Image (cartoon, grey):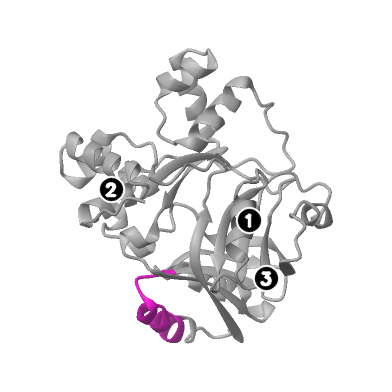
Amino acid sequence: MESITVDDLDRQLTQCLGVDGRASFSAIADVLGVSDQTVARRYRRLRSAGAMRVVGLKYPKSAGYANWFLRLRCVPGSGEAIAAALAQRSDTAWVQLLSGDTEVLCSLRGDASDGTESLLTRLPRSGRIVAVTAYSRLHMFTGGPDALGFMDVLPAARVEPLRVAVRPRPRPTEPEEAASDLDAALFSALALDGRTPYADIAAASSYSETTVRRRMEQLRETGLLYFDLELDMPTFGFRSSAWLFLSVPPSHLADVGSALAKFPEVAYVTATTGPANLAACAVCRDEESLYEFLTARVGALPGVERVETAPIIRTVKQASPVMVPRP
């Protein structure tokens, strides 16, 4: 990708987009105290360089949805090819290369009504995959665009005016509204670019711009549509990220998960099934910062019995099912 340098204003803009990926440039300019043109120019620079992308996604309800992620151990030197193959599949969400090209971590998306065995059968058959561990997400403590604590350069109160009010999401037992052609057009366009103009979606869907705007607002208000950020971490100065797989007694699980979620370095933490019952993604600037985080923060938590650390070598696929070529 194109090599660019980011400064505090770029980070502030990114933090604002983490709060609302479709916030207008004028609204962001009011928060940052700069002109609309400056915000627009900075955003387009980051977007065109592949450093950041806003994506709009359908909220994955727990009922009938693949709430699993897989850890694949590979023959040394084969992880890159396996990760690339998984990234091209529509039933994978994020795909990451771990531990020096010997492991791949991927999240599954789609219907889980047939159970875990059905999901595992969709994996590519390869003798280069030597072991697969499946984790079911039981409870997410933090994650998504709000978990940008590692990049926070503005106090939370400063960006709060950008936040969109969301009603409680429907329970899994409640019937969903039937998907329409308009919804399909919306999610298709927003998965590629979450800031796609209403007029462009209207032209592609044959609906009026007013109808498109109204429907998008309805989906956002009910939490069925949310916006996430895809970031190139090294561009923003974070070159040492890792997954932590923690073993914690069940009586300490909620406390440890909640404590991890409060650390600014933690971008994601969930309670899981499997050999470890907590999985967390930590984002740090360098190896020394990661070491200090592990020893001073994680090591000080009562109840943590064991921590396995798996460095993230490269993120091959992020939140959106639609991948775009790197500049």
Is 199 on the left-hand or right-hand side of 313?
left
Q: Which residue is mark 2?
A: 13
- Which mark is first along the chain, 1 or 2? 2
Question: Badges 3 and 2: C-beta atoms under 8 Å apart?
Answer: no
Q: Which residues are magenta?
A: 283-297
The part of the image, by quadrant, that contains residue 276 is: bottom right
The reply to whether residue 90 is visible in this rendering is yes
> For this rendering, which residue is in front, 237 or 257?
237
Residue type, mark 2 in image: Leu
**Residue 208 appears left or right of 92:** left
Q: Is residue 10 left or right of residue 305?
A: left
Query: What residue did someone put label 1 on?
Result: 107
Determine the secondary structure under disc 1.
strand
Which residue is rendered at x = 66% and y = 66% of the image? Answer: 71
Quadrant in the rendering for residue 116 = bottom right
Q: Earlier in the sequence, mark 3 or mark 2?
A: 2
Residue that numbered label 3 is attached to:
73
Q: Is residue 161 magenta?
A: no
Q: Is most of the magenta stretch helix, strand or loop?
A: helix
- Graded by Cα atoms within 10 Å as few (under 14), some (14 to 19) or many (20 or more), the crowding at tag 2 reads many
Residue 309, given in percent of the width and then of the height, sits at 54, 78
At 29% across and 39% down in the image, what residue appears? Answer: 44
Give percent across and percent down for residue 127: 76, 65
